[in-house]
Image: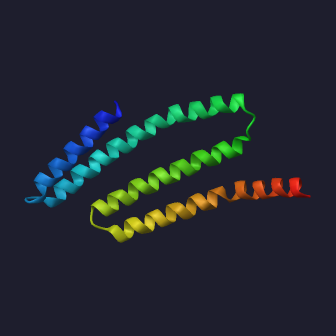
Amino acid sequence: MTVVTIAVMGIVAVLLAVALKSSKGEYGTYLVMAAGFFIFFYGIGKLKTILDTIKEVQTYIKINSAYLSTLVKMIGITYIAEFAAGICKDAGYGAMGNQIEIFGKLSVLAVSMPILLALIETLQVFLS
């Protein structure tokens, strides 16, 4: 599937949800959530391509695997947090969506701290 196919599927789901909103609003929410989960899991399938490419880049350039692992974790945290926050906001619970976004940002910051410390240590060596 291409981006166009996924976009059309999302638009159709939203249009059906809008049509259902007047009679059974909760069914529209469930429909959009189901379409969102489908797109989410399809996007997870694309992760294999990304991971294979990162491994190939690692063979060309000598990069510590911890850095790449952290990068993948950061991407995963961001993707999951944005997805969950979007669902909460679409369901009318914007405050919960905002809290998930904040927690996602803090999680990315926490995961990146060891890399920040390694960078500071490297700078200390050059400046000393």
Q: Pick out the residue farthest to the left.
A: 23
Q: List x then y, in percent, for residue 99.
A: 44, 68
What residue is rendered at 41% in x and 40% in y? 43
Residue 54 is left or right of residue 117, and the answer is left
Left or right: residue 21 compared with residue 72 = left
Quarter in which the C terminus is drawn: bottom right
Figure quadrant of residue 89: bottom left
In the rendered image, the vertical position of residue 73 relative to residue 57, given as above or below:
below
Q: Position of residue 95 (x, y in %)?
A: 37, 71
Task: Give residue 109's quadrant in the image.
Answer: bottom right
Answer left or right for 109 relative to 61.
left
Is 49 above or below relative to 104?
above
- Comparing 7 with 87, the one in front is 7
Horizontal and vertical percent position of residue 25: 15, 60
Looking at the rendered image, the quarter that the N terminus falls into is top left
Residue located farthest toward the bottom when viewing the structure as drawn: 95
- 5 sits left or right of 50 in the view: left
